Amino acid sequence: MCVEPAVIYLRYAKRHLCRAHLIEDIEQRVLSTVENKKLISTGDRIAVALSGGKDSTALLILLCRLLPALKDVSLVAITIDEGITSYREDTVHSAEDLTRRLGIEHHCISFTEQFGDPLDDLLKGRESQACSICGILRKKALNIGAHRVGATKLATGHNLDDEAQSVLMNVLRGDLPRLVRNSGNDSQSAFIQRIKPLAYISEKEIATYLILNDAWKNLPECPYTRYALRREVRTMLTTLEYRYPGTMLRLMESKRKIEYYCAGSMVCEPIRGCRECGDPCSGDICQVCLLRRSLGL
Amino acid sequence: MKIILPDQSIQTLDRGSTPVENVLSDLGINSLEVIVSRNGKLVSEDTVVGADDEIRIIRIAHGG
Ligand SMILES: [Zn+2]
Ligand SMILES: [Zn+2]
């Protein structure tokens, strides 16, 4: 029995943890996720999508610490500067500080360099679609970056809250293909495999981990989130999680079961090459090329 | 007790010893969305805080 004061009470597990035990617990759970889901293999060069915000900061710190337990694995950080005024500058600086401190190779790619304009300009008059447009372009930029640095996998900082929100959002939109396509199935495409080592760590645990490691920064929130369905789903799910602890984990379990029962069936369109750019996609033309057309890029 | 809210404003709460969770619910805050420290040290939501304590509430921003 530990006698140190608790820094967190994990409602879903009914556990109190002190500083040292919380750090150990989170690192152990991330390692278990990596091992059980075989996210990382010997010889992998992992590109970490480092926005500089809290989740990707925690991800990079955690992977650095777990490196000795992973055989012959190297890390490289990639930051995408979408061009969002009074938001991205701070997080890009934070990403630069962190990689310098950890001694990790760091590359930055901007929307301006890749798509001709910063996101703020691309979005004029389409602010309500901000998150989906930004998401499509960021994914493309990350893939370009990951190829450029010779990475074998791309790790993102999606946490339990993000993942549970995505499950619910895909259900609310009636988008079964996306619900089952999101996770491991990505590996079948020609895109670099994406891994989410923090998928079972809650937002609160991540924030606490950062504070305990002196890596917490008060950063601004993306100005475009106010347009997003995700924001409403987030509030709703956090309320449900508070009243019914374990709700988010149970949503993940629902997703796992749906994936299991859908395996082998043709829920997703077969993957083909985009008619314009050759990237893997499920229709004739990939989302990036569709977007390039509608934005006139 | 002295409460430092996420926006840095300060509020004095006239309350005896009570768990952090009650302080938060009085303020209409879900404990999953914030981190709380007492006199500079992180505390769990069921920690009982007293009249002489300084409580800081930090909001967890989304994203990242
Ligand atoms: Zn302990
Ligand atoms: Zn294309």
Image (tube, coloured by chain):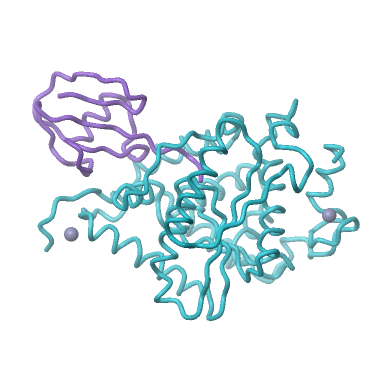
Above or below, A10 relative to A41: above
Q: In the image, what residue occupies the spot 79% across and 65% down?
A: A270
**Percent position (x, y) of residue A246?**
37, 51
> Where is the C terminus of chain A found, in terms of image quarters?
top right
Whether residue A37 is situated above or below residue A196 in the rendered picture: below
- Which image quadrant: the N terminus of chain A? bottom left
Q: Which of B27 and A252 is in front in this view?
A: B27
In the current view of this chain or complex, which residue is farthest to the right?
A: A275
**Numbered disc total:** 0
**Residue at position x 40%, y 41% from top?**
A217
Q: Which quadrant of the view contains residue B26?
A: top left
Question: In the image, ligand 2 is in what quadrant?
Answer: bottom right
- Using residue A211 as the reference point, say whether residue A135 is left or right of it: right
Identify the chain drawn in cyan.
Answer: A
Spot occupied by residue A157 in the image (x, y as percentages of width and height): 50, 54
Image location (x, y in percent) of residue A192: 67, 66
**What shade has chain B been given?**
purple
When the figure is inspected, residue B57 is found, relative to residue A23, above or below; the finding is above
Left or right of A12 in this view: A174: right
Q: Splitting the image into 4 quarters, where does residue B45 fall?
A: top left
Q: Where is residue A161 in the image (x, y as percent from the top left)?
A: 46, 48
- With respect to residue B45, does B5 lie above or below? above
